[in-house]
Image (cartoon, helix red, strand yellow):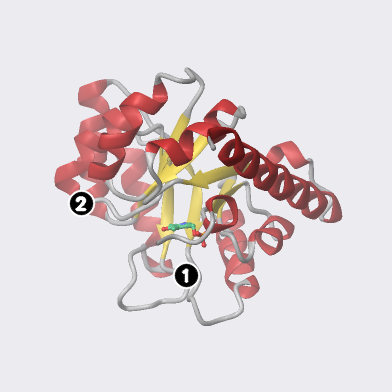
Amino acid sequence: MQEAIRETAQSRLNEITSHMSAAAKLAGRAPEDVTLIAVSKTRSVSDIEPLIRAGHRNYGENRIQEAQAKWPELKNLDAGIVLHLIGQLQSNKAAEAVSLFDIIHSLDRLSLATALGKAMRDQDRFLPCFIQVNIGAEPQKGGCAIEALPELLAATQAEIIPVAGLMCLPPADMEPAPFFALLAELSARYGLDGLSMGMSGDFQTAIMLGATHIRVGTALFGERV
Ligand SMILES: *Cc1c(COP(=O)(O)O)cnc(C)c1O
């Protein structure tokens, strides 16, 4: 049983990796410049373990509490694990996020920059942060408005927060490519390197448009229940 699960996770991982390489090559990019984040939210420790044993090291979670319950144990399996926070973060959880995670993808407002800056200095742990941009200007969604980016970038500098790049989640019901292209353009405008964009359904498109980090859940683990 355990063996069967491992095979499945590993074969999906191999399949996704080969699609990633193909997309990178088409765009004239090096496949190793794109990091696959296995989005393990809602998955149990026993779902995740086979992927760790297969050698995969980058994982993404969207809730602090769930991550705190699963990852201290899982991190013991491989010292090289890199844990990404991909969900909205409340300022009062900033210290917990800084102590558990390695990279944050959801820095999206001034108050959070202040809280994260303080937590990082207190813990002497300076985590790279992606600025999440509300790329489709959707009122219900997290993310910094495009017009507010310069001010938020200035705040990260003042708080000594390392900025890894920009992150987005395009509107669910629209063609994602124009939003990925817009994020890439913003990243170039502000001289940033990283682009966290692309999920199970659109990661090849995202890679062709410059993604450095793709966040893939269902294509790796199956449908969430
Ligand atoms: C859940 C989630 C993903 C993964 O989505 P899939 O469609 O399952 O690949 C990516 N990014 C964020 C921010 C998520 O919350």
Viewer-closest of 182 and 213: 213
- Asked if residue 116 can be seen in this view, the reply is yes
178 relative to 44, above or below: below
Q: For the point 81% across and 55% down, which residue is it?
A: 27
Q: Tag on residue 156? A: none
Question: How many residues crowd around disc 2 within 10 Å: few (fewer than 14), some, or many (20 or more)?
Answer: few
Q: Is residue 143 left or right of residue 182?
A: left
What residue is shown with label 1? 135
Disc 1 marks a residue whose amino acid type is Ile
Where residue 72 sits, quadrant-wise, is top left
Q: How many numbered badges does the structure rendering display?
A: 2
**Could you say whether the residue bearing mark 2 is in a helix, strand or loop?**
loop
Amino acid type of the residue tagged 2 in the rendering: Gln
Which is nearer the eye, 53 or 30? Answer: 53
- In three-dimensional space, the C-alpha distance between marks 1 and 2, rounded to whole angstroms, equals 20 Å
Q: Position of residue 80 (x, y in %)?
A: 51, 21
